[in-house]
Image: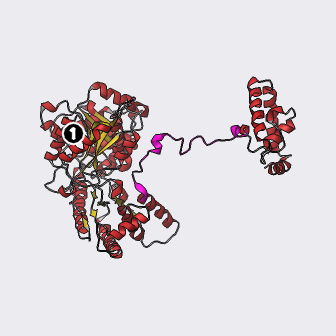
Amino acid sequence: MAQRNLEWYSVHTYGVALREMAQRNVEWYSVHKNSVALCEMAQRNVEWHSLHTNSVALPDPYTIFVFADLFDILVFLISVDSHPLQMETAAQEILTDKTINPVFQRAYNVRGWVNTRAYEIKHEMALGERKPFDEVVIHYGDPHAFGQSPITFLRQCLACLLCPQFLNDPQFPKDVKEKARRILKATPGFAISSYTNTFGLRLIREDVAKYISRRDGYPADVDDVILTNGGAIGIQIGLASLGTDMPNGKLKPGLMIPIPVFPQYKSRIVEFNLYEIPYYLEEENNWSFNIGEMKKAIDKARPHCEPRGLVLINPGNPTGQILSYDNIREVIKFCVREKLVLFADEVYQETVFIKGVPFHSCRKVLRDLGSEYNDFQLMSLNSASKGFYGECGLRGGYLELVGFSNAVKSQFRDMMSPSVSGSTIGQAAMSLICCPPQPGDESYEIFIQEKTAILESYERKAKITTAMLNSLEGVTCNEVTGALYAFPRIRLPQKAIEEAKRNNHNPDGFYCWQLMETTGIVPTPGENYGQKEGTYHFRLTILPSEEKIAPMYERLSKFHKEFMDKYKDNKEN
Protein backbone atom coordinates (compact mmCIF):
# COMPACT_ATOMS: atom_id res chain seq x y z
CA MET A 1 0.00 0.00 0.00
CA ALA A 2 2.85 2.35 0.90
CA GLN A 3 4.47 1.60 -2.46
CA ARG A 4 1.26 2.45 -4.33
CA ASN A 5 0.92 5.72 -2.46
CA LEU A 6 4.53 6.66 -3.10
CA GLU A 7 3.95 6.07 -6.82
CA TRP A 8 0.82 8.20 -6.68
CA TYR A 9 2.69 10.96 -4.87
CA SER A 10 5.54 10.96 -7.39
CA VAL A 11 3.06 11.45 -10.22
CA HIS A 12 1.07 14.20 -8.51
CA THR A 13 3.84 16.17 -6.75
CA TYR A 14 3.41 19.17 -9.01
CA GLY A 15 -0.35 18.86 -9.39
CA VAL A 16 -2.38 21.99 -8.73
CA ALA A 17 -4.94 20.02 -6.72
CA LEU A 18 -2.16 18.66 -4.50
CA ARG A 19 -0.76 22.13 -3.85
CA GLU A 20 -4.25 23.36 -2.93
CA MET A 21 -4.60 20.43 -0.53
CA ALA A 22 -1.28 21.31 1.02
CA GLN A 23 -2.33 24.94 1.44
CA ARG A 24 -5.57 23.91 3.15
CA ASN A 25 -3.63 21.63 5.51
CA VAL A 26 -1.19 24.45 6.36
CA GLU A 27 -4.11 26.73 7.23
CA TRP A 28 -5.87 24.00 9.19
CA TYR A 29 -2.69 23.11 11.13
CA SER A 30 -1.89 26.72 12.02
CA VAL A 31 -5.38 27.19 13.49
CA HIS A 32 -5.58 23.90 15.36
CA LYS A 33 -2.03 23.15 16.56
CA ASN A 34 -2.73 24.31 20.11
CA SER A 35 -6.18 22.71 20.33
CA VAL A 36 -6.82 20.46 23.32
CA ALA A 37 -9.12 18.31 21.19
CA LEU A 38 -6.33 18.00 18.64
CA CYS A 39 -3.87 16.83 21.27
CA GLU A 40 -6.37 14.25 22.48
CA MET A 41 -6.93 13.06 18.93
CA ALA A 42 -3.19 12.83 18.44
CA GLN A 43 -2.85 10.73 21.57
CA ARG A 44 -5.56 8.34 20.32
CA ASN A 45 -3.81 8.01 16.98
CA VAL A 46 -0.44 7.37 18.62
CA GLU A 47 -2.05 4.59 20.66
CA TRP A 48 -3.73 3.21 17.55
CA HIS A 49 -0.45 3.31 15.65
CA SER A 50 1.44 1.48 18.41
CA LEU A 51 -0.98 -1.43 18.00
CA HIS A 52 -0.53 -1.56 14.22
CA THR A 53 3.19 -0.87 13.80
CA ASN A 54 3.85 -4.30 12.32
CA SER A 55 1.02 -4.08 9.78
CA VAL A 56 2.17 -4.74 6.21
CA ALA A 57 -0.24 -2.07 4.99
CA LEU A 58 1.54 0.70 7.01
CA PRO A 59 4.65 2.59 5.91
CA ASP A 60 7.26 3.87 8.32
CA PRO A 61 5.83 4.74 11.75
CA TYR A 62 4.50 8.21 11.23
CA THR A 63 1.38 9.65 12.83
CA ILE A 64 -0.20 12.82 11.68
CA PHE A 65 -0.06 14.76 14.92
CA VAL A 66 3.61 14.18 15.74
CA PHE A 67 4.73 15.81 12.49
CA ALA A 68 5.95 19.39 12.57
CA ASP A 69 6.77 19.51 8.91
CA LEU A 70 3.95 20.12 6.39
CA PHE A 71 5.67 17.83 3.86
CA ASP A 72 5.49 14.96 6.34
CA ILE A 73 1.82 15.71 7.03
CA LEU A 74 1.08 15.59 3.33
CA VAL A 75 3.01 12.37 2.75
CA PHE A 76 1.19 10.77 5.63
CA LEU A 77 -2.25 11.83 4.33
CA ILE A 78 -1.39 10.32 0.97
CA SER A 79 0.32 7.15 2.12
CA VAL A 80 -1.76 5.73 4.97
CA ASP A 81 -4.92 4.40 3.29
CA SER A 82 -6.10 2.52 6.37
CA HIS A 83 -5.73 5.27 8.98
CA PRO A 84 -8.94 5.96 10.95
CA LEU A 85 -8.56 9.72 10.58
CA GLN A 86 -8.68 9.46 6.82
CA MET A 87 -11.97 7.55 7.15
CA GLU A 88 -13.34 10.55 9.06
CA THR A 89 -12.55 12.88 6.17
CA ALA A 90 -13.97 10.62 3.43
CA ALA A 91 -17.58 10.32 2.35
CA GLN A 92 -19.28 7.56 4.31
CA GLU A 93 -22.37 5.49 3.48
CA ILE A 94 -24.63 6.54 6.34
CA LEU A 95 -27.91 5.11 5.01
CA THR A 96 -27.65 1.42 4.11
CA ASP A 97 -30.10 -1.44 3.77
CA LYS A 98 -29.26 -2.24 7.42
CA THR A 99 -29.56 1.30 8.85
CA ILE A 100 -32.60 2.49 6.86
CA ASN A 101 -35.84 3.08 8.76
CA PRO A 102 -37.25 -0.34 9.77
CA VAL A 103 -40.53 0.60 8.06
CA PHE A 104 -38.66 0.53 4.75
CA GLN A 105 -37.11 -2.82 5.61
CA ARG A 106 -40.55 -4.26 6.29
CA ALA A 107 -42.06 -2.77 3.11
CA TYR A 108 -44.37 -5.04 1.13
CA ASN A 109 -43.98 -5.10 -2.66
CA VAL A 110 -47.57 -4.63 -3.76
CA ARG A 111 -46.93 -5.55 -7.40
CA GLY A 112 -44.62 -8.51 -7.04
CA TRP A 113 -41.74 -10.06 -8.96
CA VAL A 114 -43.73 -11.10 -12.04
CA ASN A 115 -44.70 -7.47 -12.61
CA THR A 116 -41.07 -6.42 -12.17
CA ARG A 117 -40.00 -8.96 -14.79
CA ALA A 118 -42.69 -7.65 -17.15
CA TYR A 119 -41.09 -4.21 -17.18
CA GLU A 120 -37.70 -5.79 -17.78
CA ILE A 121 -39.13 -7.54 -20.84
CA LYS A 122 -40.58 -4.23 -22.06
CA HIS A 123 -37.12 -2.69 -21.77
CA GLU A 124 -35.50 -5.62 -23.57
CA MET A 125 -37.96 -5.27 -26.44
CA ALA A 126 -37.30 -1.52 -26.62
CA LEU A 127 -33.61 -2.34 -27.09
CA GLY A 128 -34.47 -4.60 -30.03
CA GLU A 129 -34.51 -8.03 -28.40
CA ARG A 130 -36.90 -10.37 -30.21
CA LYS A 131 -39.69 -12.10 -28.27
CA PRO A 132 -42.38 -14.58 -29.34
CA PHE A 133 -44.97 -11.78 -28.99
CA ASP A 134 -45.41 -8.18 -30.13
CA GLU A 135 -46.39 -6.50 -26.88
CA VAL A 136 -46.45 -6.96 -23.12
CA VAL A 137 -49.98 -6.74 -21.67
CA ILE A 138 -49.78 -6.09 -17.92
CA HIS A 139 -53.14 -6.80 -16.29
CA TYR A 140 -53.61 -3.93 -13.87
CA GLY A 141 -56.57 -1.64 -13.20
CA ASP A 142 -55.71 1.38 -15.33
CA PRO A 143 -58.48 1.87 -17.95
CA HIS A 144 -56.79 4.59 -19.98
CA ALA A 145 -53.54 2.62 -20.20
CA PHE A 146 -55.57 0.03 -22.14
CA GLY A 147 -56.88 2.65 -24.56
CA GLN A 148 -60.24 3.43 -22.95
CA SER A 149 -61.34 6.91 -24.04
CA PRO A 150 -61.75 9.49 -21.28
CA ILE A 151 -65.15 11.03 -20.59
CA THR A 152 -65.39 14.16 -22.76
CA PHE A 153 -67.32 16.23 -20.20
CA LEU A 154 -64.70 15.71 -17.51
CA ARG A 155 -61.75 16.47 -19.76
CA GLN A 156 -63.38 19.60 -21.19
CA CYS A 157 -64.01 20.91 -17.68
CA LEU A 158 -60.41 20.21 -16.70
CA ALA A 159 -59.21 22.04 -19.81
CA CYS A 160 -61.21 25.12 -18.79
CA LEU A 161 -59.88 24.92 -15.24
CA LEU A 162 -56.28 24.76 -16.43
CA CYS A 163 -56.73 27.35 -19.22
CA PRO A 164 -59.40 29.82 -18.04
CA GLN A 165 -59.31 31.58 -21.43
CA PHE A 166 -61.37 28.64 -22.71
CA LEU A 167 -64.25 29.95 -20.60
CA ASN A 168 -64.92 32.37 -23.46
CA ASP A 169 -64.47 29.77 -26.21
CA PRO A 170 -67.77 28.96 -28.00
CA GLN A 171 -66.49 25.45 -28.82
CA PHE A 172 -66.97 24.39 -25.19
CA PRO A 173 -70.50 23.48 -24.03
CA LYS A 174 -72.25 25.98 -21.78
CA ASP A 175 -72.64 23.57 -18.84
CA VAL A 176 -68.93 22.68 -19.01
CA LYS A 177 -67.93 26.33 -18.71
CA GLU A 178 -70.42 26.93 -15.90
CA LYS A 179 -69.06 24.04 -13.83
CA ALA A 180 -65.46 25.12 -14.41
CA ARG A 181 -66.23 28.74 -13.52
CA ARG A 182 -68.03 27.62 -10.36
CA ILE A 183 -64.96 25.68 -9.16
CA LEU A 184 -62.55 28.49 -10.07
CA LYS A 185 -64.59 31.01 -8.07
CA ALA A 186 -64.07 28.81 -5.00
CA THR A 187 -60.27 28.82 -5.38
CA PRO A 188 -57.92 31.52 -4.07
CA GLY A 189 -57.04 33.86 -6.94
CA PHE A 190 -59.47 32.19 -9.39
CA ALA A 191 -56.67 29.64 -9.97
CA ILE A 192 -56.92 25.85 -9.85
CA SER A 193 -53.21 25.78 -8.97
CA SER A 194 -53.76 27.48 -5.59
CA TYR A 195 -53.45 25.71 -2.26
CA THR A 196 -56.68 24.60 -0.61
CA ASN A 197 -57.85 23.72 2.89
CA THR A 198 -56.19 20.60 4.32
CA PHE A 199 -59.40 18.60 3.80
CA GLY A 200 -59.89 20.15 0.33
CA LEU A 201 -62.04 22.91 -1.16
CA ARG A 202 -65.25 23.18 0.83
CA LEU A 203 -67.31 23.61 -2.36
CA ILE A 204 -66.07 20.26 -3.65
CA ARG A 205 -66.61 18.58 -0.29
CA GLU A 206 -70.19 19.87 -0.47
CA ASP A 207 -70.50 18.29 -3.93
CA VAL A 208 -69.31 14.97 -2.51
CA ALA A 209 -71.73 15.19 0.43
CA LYS A 210 -74.65 15.85 -1.95
CA TYR A 211 -73.59 12.88 -4.10
CA ILE A 212 -73.53 10.59 -1.05
CA SER A 213 -76.94 11.91 0.05
CA ARG A 214 -78.47 11.16 -3.38
CA ARG A 215 -76.86 7.72 -3.51
CA ASP A 216 -77.99 6.56 -0.06
CA GLY A 217 -81.20 8.50 0.54
CA TYR A 218 -79.81 9.86 3.83
CA PRO A 219 -78.20 13.31 4.30
CA ALA A 220 -74.41 13.44 4.51
CA ASP A 221 -72.39 16.03 6.45
CA VAL A 222 -69.79 18.04 4.53
CA ASP A 223 -67.58 18.04 7.64
CA ASP A 224 -67.35 14.24 7.41
CA VAL A 225 -65.68 14.44 3.98
CA ILE A 226 -61.91 14.49 3.43
CA LEU A 227 -60.60 14.88 -0.13
CA THR A 228 -57.53 12.71 -0.75
CA ASN A 229 -54.91 12.16 -3.43
CA GLY A 230 -56.55 9.03 -4.79
CA GLY A 231 -57.76 5.97 -2.95
CA ALA A 232 -54.27 4.96 -1.82
CA ILE A 233 -53.88 8.02 0.41
CA GLY A 234 -57.35 7.42 1.82
CA ILE A 235 -56.25 3.92 2.82
CA GLN A 236 -53.07 5.32 4.34
CA ILE A 237 -54.89 7.97 6.39
CA GLY A 238 -57.63 5.63 7.56
CA LEU A 239 -55.38 2.78 8.64
CA ALA A 240 -52.85 5.13 10.23
CA SER A 241 -55.58 6.32 12.60
CA LEU A 242 -56.06 2.77 13.90
CA GLY A 243 -52.45 2.47 15.08
CA THR A 244 -51.25 3.04 18.65
CA ASP A 245 -47.96 3.92 20.36
CA MET A 246 -47.96 0.47 21.99
CA PRO A 247 -46.39 1.24 25.40
CA ASN A 248 -44.58 -1.61 27.10
CA GLY A 249 -46.82 -4.58 27.66
CA LYS A 250 -49.55 -3.39 25.32
CA LEU A 251 -50.60 -5.52 22.36
CA LYS A 252 -50.43 -4.37 18.75
CA PRO A 253 -53.63 -2.98 17.24
CA GLY A 254 -55.22 -5.64 15.04
CA LEU A 255 -56.82 -5.18 11.61
CA MET A 256 -59.07 -7.75 9.99
CA ILE A 257 -58.55 -7.97 6.22
CA PRO A 258 -60.27 -10.19 3.65
CA ILE A 259 -58.27 -12.85 1.86
CA PRO A 260 -57.77 -12.45 -1.07
CA VAL A 261 -57.04 -8.74 -0.55
CA PHE A 262 -55.75 -5.76 -2.53
CA PRO A 263 -52.01 -5.80 -1.58
CA GLN A 264 -52.05 -2.13 -0.55
CA TYR A 265 -53.59 -3.24 2.74
CA LYS A 266 -50.79 -5.65 3.58
CA SER A 267 -48.32 -2.88 2.82
CA ARG A 268 -50.04 -0.43 5.17
CA ILE A 269 -50.30 -3.04 7.92
CA VAL A 270 -46.52 -3.35 7.75
CA GLU A 271 -46.03 0.42 7.60
CA PHE A 272 -48.15 1.13 10.68
CA ASN A 273 -47.00 -1.93 12.62
CA LEU A 274 -50.50 -3.39 12.85
CA TYR A 275 -51.31 -7.02 13.51
CA GLU A 276 -52.88 -8.74 10.51
CA ILE A 277 -56.04 -10.74 11.18
CA PRO A 278 -56.92 -12.52 7.93
CA TYR A 279 -60.42 -13.77 7.25
CA TYR A 280 -61.08 -15.88 4.16
CA LEU A 281 -63.83 -15.09 1.68
CA GLU A 282 -65.92 -18.06 0.53
CA GLU A 283 -64.93 -18.69 -3.07
CA GLU A 284 -67.57 -21.40 -3.48
CA ASN A 285 -70.24 -18.83 -2.49
CA ASN A 286 -69.16 -16.09 -4.92
CA TRP A 287 -66.51 -14.70 -2.54
CA SER A 288 -69.03 -13.81 0.19
CA PHE A 289 -68.33 -13.22 3.89
CA ASN A 290 -68.70 -16.09 6.34
CA ILE A 291 -69.44 -14.55 9.74
CA GLY A 292 -68.70 -17.81 11.56
CA GLU A 293 -65.20 -18.00 10.07
CA MET A 294 -64.64 -14.31 10.83
CA LYS A 295 -65.53 -14.96 14.47
CA LYS A 296 -63.02 -17.81 14.64
CA ALA A 297 -60.33 -15.57 13.10
CA ILE A 298 -60.77 -12.72 15.57
CA ASP A 299 -60.97 -15.03 18.60
CA LYS A 300 -57.74 -16.71 17.52
CA ALA A 301 -56.02 -13.33 17.15
CA ARG A 302 -57.13 -11.70 20.43
CA PRO A 303 -54.30 -13.15 22.59
CA HIS A 304 -51.83 -11.50 20.18
CA CYS A 305 -53.41 -8.13 19.46
CA GLU A 306 -56.13 -5.62 20.26
CA PRO A 307 -58.54 -5.81 17.27
CA ARG A 308 -59.58 -2.29 16.22
CA GLY A 309 -60.80 -2.42 12.63
CA LEU A 310 -62.13 -4.50 9.74
CA VAL A 311 -61.60 -3.90 6.02
CA LEU A 312 -64.38 -4.64 3.54
CA ILE A 313 -63.78 -4.28 -0.22
CA ASN A 314 -66.94 -3.97 -2.32
CA PRO A 315 -67.02 -4.42 -5.29
CA GLY A 316 -64.18 -6.86 -4.78
CA ASN A 317 -60.56 -6.50 -5.76
CA PRO A 318 -59.16 -8.94 -6.86
CA THR A 319 -62.31 -11.06 -6.74
CA GLY A 320 -64.71 -9.09 -8.97
CA GLN A 321 -67.86 -9.74 -6.91
CA ILE A 322 -70.56 -7.46 -5.48
CA LEU A 323 -71.67 -8.14 -1.91
CA SER A 324 -75.34 -8.64 -1.17
CA TYR A 325 -77.30 -6.27 1.05
CA ASP A 326 -77.74 -9.00 3.68
CA ASN A 327 -74.05 -9.86 3.71
CA ILE A 328 -73.11 -6.22 4.35
CA ARG A 329 -75.67 -5.97 7.16
CA GLU A 330 -74.18 -9.07 8.80
CA VAL A 331 -70.70 -7.53 8.63
CA ILE A 332 -71.88 -4.29 10.28
CA LYS A 333 -73.52 -6.23 13.11
CA PHE A 334 -70.34 -8.30 13.50
CA CYS A 335 -68.31 -5.09 13.86
CA VAL A 336 -70.72 -3.81 16.51
CA ARG A 337 -70.40 -7.02 18.54
CA GLU A 338 -66.62 -7.09 18.25
CA LYS A 339 -66.17 -3.31 18.72
CA LEU A 340 -64.47 -2.70 15.37
CA VAL A 341 -64.25 0.34 13.09
CA LEU A 342 -65.43 -0.63 9.59
CA PHE A 343 -63.22 0.55 6.71
CA ALA A 344 -65.30 0.22 3.52
CA ASP A 345 -63.23 0.32 0.32
CA GLU A 346 -65.88 1.18 -2.28
CA VAL A 347 -63.72 2.63 -5.05
CA TYR A 348 -65.36 0.40 -7.69
CA GLN A 349 -68.92 1.47 -6.85
CA GLU A 350 -69.39 2.99 -10.33
CA THR A 351 -68.01 -0.16 -11.98
CA VAL A 352 -71.22 -2.17 -11.76
CA PHE A 353 -72.48 -3.53 -15.07
CA ILE A 354 -74.49 -6.74 -14.60
CA LYS A 355 -78.24 -6.16 -14.62
CA GLY A 356 -79.94 -7.27 -11.42
CA VAL A 357 -76.75 -7.10 -9.32
CA PRO A 358 -76.83 -3.66 -7.62
CA PHE A 359 -74.20 -2.01 -5.46
CA HIS A 360 -75.18 -1.24 -1.85
CA SER A 361 -73.00 1.18 0.09
CA CYS A 362 -72.12 0.28 3.67
CA ARG A 363 -73.36 3.70 4.73
CA LYS A 364 -76.84 3.10 3.31
CA VAL A 365 -77.09 -0.32 4.94
CA LEU A 366 -75.91 1.22 8.21
CA ARG A 367 -78.54 3.99 8.09
CA ASP A 368 -81.24 1.45 7.24
CA LEU A 369 -80.45 -0.33 10.52
CA GLY A 370 -81.85 2.63 12.45
CA SER A 371 -80.88 5.15 15.10
CA GLU A 372 -79.46 2.57 17.49
CA TYR A 373 -76.48 2.37 15.13
CA ASN A 374 -75.91 6.15 14.98
CA ASP A 375 -72.66 5.87 16.97
CA PHE A 376 -71.21 3.17 14.70
CA GLN A 377 -67.88 4.26 13.19
CA LEU A 378 -67.45 3.82 9.44
CA MET A 379 -64.77 5.04 7.05
CA SER A 380 -65.93 4.97 3.43
CA LEU A 381 -63.50 5.30 0.51
CA ASN A 382 -64.11 6.36 -3.11
CA SER A 383 -61.78 7.31 -5.95
CA ALA A 384 -61.65 9.03 -9.35
CA SER A 385 -59.35 6.26 -10.57
CA LYS A 386 -62.02 3.61 -11.01
CA GLY A 387 -65.60 3.46 -12.27
CA PHE A 388 -66.22 4.27 -15.92
CA TYR A 389 -64.13 7.44 -15.53
CA GLY A 390 -60.84 5.64 -14.89
CA GLU A 391 -58.84 8.82 -14.15
CA CYS A 392 -56.01 7.03 -12.31
CA GLY A 393 -53.29 9.64 -12.77
CA LEU A 394 -55.35 12.62 -11.63
CA ARG A 395 -55.23 11.31 -8.03
CA GLY A 396 -58.69 12.21 -6.85
CA GLY A 397 -60.56 10.55 -4.01
CA TYR A 398 -62.41 11.04 -0.77
CA LEU A 399 -62.72 9.43 2.65
CA GLU A 400 -65.99 9.88 4.55
CA LEU A 401 -65.80 9.64 8.35
CA VAL A 402 -69.18 8.51 9.70
CA GLY A 403 -69.82 8.46 13.45
CA PHE A 404 -66.59 10.21 14.48
CA SER A 405 -66.50 13.16 16.89
CA ASN A 406 -65.34 16.64 15.91
CA ALA A 407 -62.31 16.11 18.15
CA VAL A 408 -61.26 13.03 16.17
CA LYS A 409 -61.83 14.77 12.82
CA SER A 410 -59.70 17.67 14.09
CA GLN A 411 -56.89 15.20 14.78
CA PHE A 412 -57.23 13.85 11.24
CA ARG A 413 -56.76 17.43 10.03
CA ASP A 414 -53.69 17.93 12.22
CA MET A 415 -52.17 14.69 10.96
CA MET A 416 -52.74 15.69 7.32
CA SER A 417 -51.69 19.34 7.67
CA PRO A 418 -47.96 18.80 6.88
CA SER A 419 -49.06 17.86 3.35
CA VAL A 420 -50.66 21.35 3.12
CA SER A 421 -53.36 20.33 0.61
CA GLY A 422 -54.21 17.66 -1.90
CA SER A 423 -54.03 17.83 -5.69
CA THR A 424 -56.52 20.45 -6.85
CA ILE A 425 -56.93 18.68 -10.20
CA GLY A 426 -57.83 15.49 -8.34
CA GLN A 427 -60.28 17.44 -6.18
CA ALA A 428 -61.89 18.96 -9.27
CA ALA A 429 -62.18 15.49 -10.84
CA MET A 430 -64.13 14.28 -7.78
CA SER A 431 -66.46 17.28 -8.05
CA LEU A 432 -67.18 16.53 -11.71
CA ILE A 433 -67.73 12.81 -11.00
CA CYS A 434 -70.16 13.69 -8.21
CA CYS A 435 -71.93 16.34 -10.33
CA PRO A 436 -72.28 14.82 -13.82
CA PRO A 437 -74.36 16.39 -16.62
CA GLN A 438 -78.13 16.25 -16.10
CA PRO A 439 -80.96 15.93 -18.64
CA GLY A 440 -81.23 19.23 -20.50
CA ASP A 441 -77.52 20.07 -20.15
CA GLU A 442 -75.64 20.55 -23.40
CA SER A 443 -73.14 17.79 -22.47
CA TYR A 444 -75.74 15.27 -21.31
CA GLU A 445 -76.32 13.25 -24.49
CA ILE A 446 -72.66 12.57 -25.26
CA PHE A 447 -71.97 11.87 -21.56
CA ILE A 448 -74.69 9.20 -21.41
CA GLN A 449 -73.51 7.69 -24.70
CA GLU A 450 -69.92 7.39 -23.46
CA LYS A 451 -70.90 6.05 -20.03
CA THR A 452 -73.28 3.47 -21.49
CA ALA A 453 -70.76 2.33 -24.10
CA ILE A 454 -68.05 1.77 -21.48
CA LEU A 455 -70.26 -0.14 -19.04
CA GLU A 456 -71.83 -2.29 -21.78
CA SER A 457 -68.34 -3.12 -23.05
CA TYR A 458 -67.31 -4.10 -19.51
CA GLU A 459 -70.32 -6.41 -19.32
CA ARG A 460 -69.49 -8.13 -22.62
CA LYS A 461 -65.83 -8.54 -21.74
CA ALA A 462 -66.67 -9.82 -18.25
CA LYS A 463 -68.85 -12.54 -19.74
CA ILE A 464 -66.23 -13.44 -22.38
CA THR A 465 -63.53 -13.60 -19.70
CA THR A 466 -65.57 -15.77 -17.34
CA ALA A 467 -66.53 -18.18 -20.14
CA MET A 468 -62.97 -18.45 -21.46
CA LEU A 469 -61.51 -19.19 -18.05
CA ASN A 470 -64.11 -21.83 -17.23
CA SER A 471 -63.33 -23.55 -20.53
CA LEU A 472 -59.70 -24.18 -19.50
CA GLU A 473 -58.63 -27.51 -18.02
CA GLY A 474 -58.40 -27.32 -14.22
CA VAL A 475 -59.67 -23.72 -14.04
CA THR A 476 -62.84 -22.43 -12.36
CA CYS A 477 -63.95 -18.81 -12.12
CA ASN A 478 -66.90 -17.10 -10.45
CA GLU A 479 -68.94 -14.69 -12.55
CA VAL A 480 -67.38 -11.23 -12.79
CA THR A 481 -70.17 -8.87 -11.67
CA GLY A 482 -68.27 -5.74 -10.65
CA ALA A 483 -64.89 -4.02 -10.47
CA LEU A 484 -62.48 -4.86 -13.29
CA TYR A 485 -61.12 -8.31 -12.49
CA ALA A 486 -61.52 -12.06 -12.70
CA PHE A 487 -59.80 -14.18 -10.07
CA PRO A 488 -59.87 -17.80 -11.28
CA ARG A 489 -58.66 -20.81 -9.34
CA ILE A 490 -56.21 -23.05 -11.18
CA ARG A 491 -55.54 -26.68 -10.23
CA LEU A 492 -51.98 -27.30 -11.31
CA PRO A 493 -50.40 -30.71 -12.02
CA GLN A 494 -48.10 -31.97 -9.29
CA LYS A 495 -45.13 -31.89 -11.67
CA ALA A 496 -45.71 -28.17 -12.25
CA ILE A 497 -45.88 -27.55 -8.50
CA GLU A 498 -42.61 -29.42 -7.97
CA GLU A 499 -40.94 -27.56 -10.85
CA ALA A 500 -42.06 -24.25 -9.34
CA LYS A 501 -40.56 -25.15 -5.97
CA ARG A 502 -37.27 -26.15 -7.63
CA ASN A 503 -37.19 -22.63 -9.09
CA ASN A 504 -38.03 -21.09 -5.68
CA HIS A 505 -41.41 -19.82 -6.92
CA ASN A 506 -44.95 -20.24 -5.70
CA PRO A 507 -46.86 -22.44 -8.16
CA ASP A 508 -49.25 -19.74 -9.40
CA GLY A 509 -46.34 -17.32 -9.73
CA PHE A 510 -44.50 -19.94 -11.79
CA TYR A 511 -47.55 -20.35 -14.06
CA CYS A 512 -47.90 -16.57 -14.55
CA TRP A 513 -44.18 -16.23 -15.26
CA GLN A 514 -44.27 -18.94 -17.91
CA LEU A 515 -47.40 -17.38 -19.45
CA MET A 516 -45.68 -14.00 -19.57
CA GLU A 517 -42.44 -15.26 -21.12
CA THR A 518 -44.40 -17.20 -23.77
CA THR A 519 -47.26 -14.85 -24.69
CA GLY A 520 -46.55 -11.41 -23.22
CA ILE A 521 -49.74 -11.67 -21.13
CA VAL A 522 -48.99 -10.65 -17.53
CA PRO A 523 -51.59 -11.67 -14.93
CA THR A 524 -50.94 -11.16 -11.23
CA PRO A 525 -50.30 -14.34 -9.21
CA GLY A 526 -52.70 -15.24 -6.43
CA GLU A 527 -49.76 -15.22 -4.01
CA ASN A 528 -49.81 -11.40 -4.18
CA TYR A 529 -53.32 -11.28 -2.72
CA GLY A 530 -53.31 -14.22 -0.33
CA GLN A 531 -55.34 -17.42 -0.73
CA LYS A 532 -56.29 -20.52 1.19
CA GLU A 533 -53.37 -22.90 1.64
CA GLY A 534 -53.15 -25.43 -1.16
CA THR A 535 -55.11 -23.30 -3.65
CA TYR A 536 -53.69 -21.30 -6.55
CA HIS A 537 -55.14 -18.33 -8.43
CA PHE A 538 -54.27 -15.45 -10.73
CA ARG A 539 -55.92 -12.12 -11.52
CA LEU A 540 -56.89 -10.94 -15.00
CA THR A 541 -58.43 -7.58 -15.85
CA ILE A 542 -61.29 -7.12 -18.32
CA LEU A 543 -59.82 -3.80 -19.53
CA PRO A 544 -58.13 -4.77 -22.85
CA SER A 545 -60.20 -3.55 -25.81
CA GLU A 546 -62.75 -5.89 -27.38
CA GLU A 547 -60.62 -5.97 -30.53
CA LYS A 548 -57.62 -7.25 -28.57
CA ILE A 549 -59.27 -9.42 -25.95
CA ALA A 550 -60.30 -12.27 -28.30
CA PRO A 551 -56.83 -12.90 -29.83
CA MET A 552 -55.25 -12.42 -26.39
CA TYR A 553 -57.46 -15.15 -24.94
CA GLU A 554 -56.63 -17.42 -27.87
CA ARG A 555 -52.94 -17.10 -26.98
CA LEU A 556 -53.70 -17.72 -23.31
CA SER A 557 -55.78 -20.84 -24.10
CA LYS A 558 -53.07 -22.23 -26.37
CA PHE A 559 -50.41 -21.66 -23.72
CA HIS A 560 -52.55 -23.23 -21.00
CA LYS A 561 -53.10 -26.43 -23.00
CA GLU A 562 -49.38 -26.76 -23.75
CA PHE A 563 -48.48 -26.06 -20.11
CA MET A 564 -50.93 -28.64 -18.76
CA ASP A 565 -49.79 -31.23 -21.33
CA LYS A 566 -46.15 -30.60 -20.48
CA TYR A 567 -46.62 -31.18 -16.75
CA LYS A 568 -49.53 -33.62 -16.87
CA ASP A 569 -49.45 -36.55 -14.47
CA ASN A 570 -51.89 -38.70 -12.59
CA LYS A 571 -51.74 -36.52 -9.48
CA GLU A 572 -53.37 -33.14 -9.58
CA ASN A 573 -53.78 -30.57 -6.85
Q: Nearer the viewer, residue 183 or 430?
A: 430
Percent x, y of residue 248: 40, 29
The question of residue 112 being in magenta is answered with yes
Three-letter residue code for mark 1: Ile
Circle 1 crowding by C-alpha within 10 Å: few under 14, some 14–19, many from 20 = many
Q: Taken as a whole, is the magenta stretch helix, strand or loop?
A: loop
The answer to whether residue 528 is above or below residue 461 is above
Can I make out residue 214 in this image?
A: no
In what quadrant of the picture does the C terminus appear? bottom left
When asked about the image quadrant of residue 52, the answer is top right
Q: Nearer the viewer, residue 274 or 481?
A: 274
When asked about the image quadrant of residue 338, the answer is top left
The answer to whether residue 438 is above or below residue 121 is above
The question of residue 422 being in magenta is answered with no
**What colour scheme does the image use?**
secondary structure
The answer to whether residue 314 is above or below residue 457 is above
Can I make out residue 122 in this image?
A: yes
When asked about the image quadrant of residue 544, the answer is bottom left
Percent x, y of residue 405: 26, 26
Percent x, y of residue 232: 36, 44
The answer to whether residue 320 is above or below residue 566 is above
Q: Which residue was labeled with disc 1?
A: 212
Q: Residue at x 43, y 73 (%)?
A: 132
Percent x, y of residue 298: 25, 41
Q: Residue at x 78, y 48 (%)?
A: 56
Count of numbered circles in the view: 1
Q: Nearer the viewer, residue 366 or 222?
A: 366
Q: Nearer the viewer, residue 212 or 242?
A: 242
Query: Element at badge 1?
Result: helix
Q: Which residues are magenta?
A: 86-113
